[in-house]
Image (spheres, helix red, strand yellow):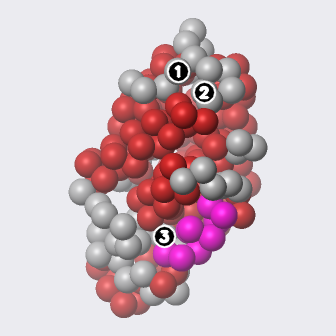
Amino acid sequence: MDVHEMKERFIRLGEVFEDQASLLTELDRAIGDGDHGVNMLRGFQALPSKLNDSSMAELFKSIGMTLMSQVGGASGPLYGFSFVKMAQVVHDEIDRANLKEILQAFSDAVAQRGKVTLNEKTMFDVIERARQAVAEDQTVSLKRLQSFADETKEIEATKGRAAYFKEESLGHIDPGAQSSVYILNALIGDE
């Protein structure tokens, strides 16, 4: 995949987040402060005018910087920092081997910045499971990514605002896990 295709995928995420904003807001109202949909939409709608597509690394870096400045809450710094870290390993032509490196950087960045591990009901639950699946050369479709997010329903939150809800967080998909489904689908999609 080249820089122009990747740029288009991330620009199209503006439409995805427009379509999914109310779902993300609803999920965040249940176990958060209800602004995740609006925040993600604002960040991804800002992308088209701020992207630098002179190279894949510059594209990822410009995505990261835009998300850091435009997305509120914990998600902006987490996603933004992750894209800056992915920019350090991405090649101008992403192949299967490079995709594994990119997902490792994504997972490491969220774990480091968010101080999270698996099964804490966060975006990391989807990102790390996707990384593991790709590392094992498994197919990671949108449906599979969604199943990773759905699994967060069974986890009691121990991190972030959702942790205040304790066992009341059970039965709800983590909003960050849900938004990471769309981002990972743009990164991995049609592999």
Instruction: Identify the residue at image location x=49%, y=17%.
Output: 58
Q: Are marks 1 and 3 in contact (CB under 8 Å)?
A: no
Query: Mark 3 or mark 1, which is nearer the start of the sequence?
Result: 1
Residue 60: in sight, yes or no?
yes
How far from the left and from the top, in percent, is residue 32? 41, 70
Dot 3 amino acid type: Asp
Q: Are marks 1 and 2 in contact (CB under 8 Å)?
A: yes
Quadrant in which the N terminus appears = top right
Quadrant in which the C terminus appears = top right
The CA distance from mark 1 to mark 3 is 31 Å
Q: Are marks 3 and 2 in contact (CB under 8 Å)?
A: no
- 109 within the magenta span: no
Graded by Cα atoms within 10 Å as few (under 14), some (14 to 19) or many (20 or more), the crowding at tag 3 reads many
Instruction: Identify the residue at image location x=56%, y=42%.
Output: 42
The CA distance from mark 1 to mark 2 is 6 Å
Residue at the disc numbered 3? 174
Find numbered disc 3 in the image and state the secondary structure of the residue it sits on. Answer: loop
How far from the left and from the top, in percent, is residue 145? 62, 61
The magenta region covers 144-152
Dot 1 amino acid type: His
Graded by Cα atoms within 10 Å as few (under 14), some (14 to 19) or many (20 or more), the crowding at tag 2 reads some
The CA distance from mark 3 to mark 2 is 29 Å
Residue at the disc numbered 2? 94
From what the image shows, is residue 160 above or below residue 141? below
Decide whether the magenta segment is chiefly helix, strand or loop.
Answer: helix
Residue at the disc numbered 1? 91
**Residue extending furthest toward the top:** 54
